[in-house]
Image (cartoon, rainbow, N blue to C red):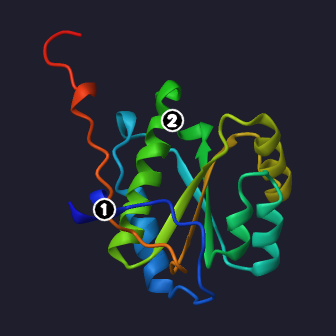
Amino acid sequence: MKEIFNRRSIRKFTNQEIKPEKIDKLLRAAMQAPSAANQQPWEFIVVQDKERLAQIADTSPYSKPVAVSAVTFVLLGDESRMKVPADWEHDMSAAAENMLLEAVYLGLGGVWFGIATRDLVIENIRQLFELPKNIQPFALISVGYPDGQENEFVDRYQAERVHYEKW
C-alpha cells in the first residue's frame, strides 16, 4: 500500500537509463490490470530514443517532460479486441495506474499524460507512429529516475467528501 500513498506525478528526471528488466516489469504490471470482459485492449509502444522522445514531447503543450524521460510508454487501445467498447478507456486507465504504481515500487518516478480526449494530440500521435485505424491513442506514461522531486506521502483524504447510505 505504500506505493499507492507515496505516488506523485514526477516530471523531472535524471539522465540515468532504466534497465530492460525494469521496463519489462512496468509492462507486466500494466497488463495485469482488470479489464471488462477480459478484453485486454492494450498495446504499448516503448520509446527510449532521445530524438523520438523530443518528437513526442512536441505533440502536446502539456507533454514537455517526455523529452527528459528515460522511457515513455505510448498506451494504445486496439478496437479489434474491444468486446465492450464503452469500457476500453477504463481498462487502459487501470493499466496506466498499475504502471505508475510499479514505477514507485521500482524506485522510479512517472507521470501520466492523457491524450484520449484531445483530438489534436490524438492525431499528432497517430501520425507520428503511423498507427492503423483500429489503434486508438490513450495516454503517455513517462518514467525515469526522479531529479529533485520525490514520491512521498501527501495526505489527500477529505472526510467531507465521503457519504454513507445517502448524499
Residue 147 vertical position relative to residue 16 in the rendered view, above or below:
above
In the rendered view, does 59 fall on the left or right side of 154?
A: right
Q: Residue 87 at x, y = what percent?
A: 47, 30
- In contact (CB < 8 Å): disc 1 and disc 2: no
User: Foreground mark, 1 or 2?
Assistant: 1
Q: Residue at x 44, y 41 (%)?
A: 91
Three-letter amino acid code at the position of disc 2:
Trp
**56 left or right of 68 in image:** right
- In the orientation shown, which residue stands out farthest toward the top? 166
Residue 93 x, y percent position in the rendering:
47, 44
Q: CA distance from mark 1 to mark 2?
A: 30 Å
Q: Residue at x 45, y 36 (%)?
A: 90
Q: Quadrant of the C terminus?
A: top left
Q: Is residue 127 left or right of residue 144?
A: right
Judging by the rendered image, the residue that carries numbered circle 1 is 153
Image location (x, y in percent) of residue 18 = 53, 85
Asked which secondary structure carries label 2, the reply is helix
Quadrant housing the N terminus: bottom left
N-terminal of the pair, mark 1 or mark 2, is 2
Give the amino acid at mark 1. Answer: Phe
Residue found at x 78% / y 35%: 119
Residue to which mark 2 is pinned: 88
26 vs 161: above or below: below
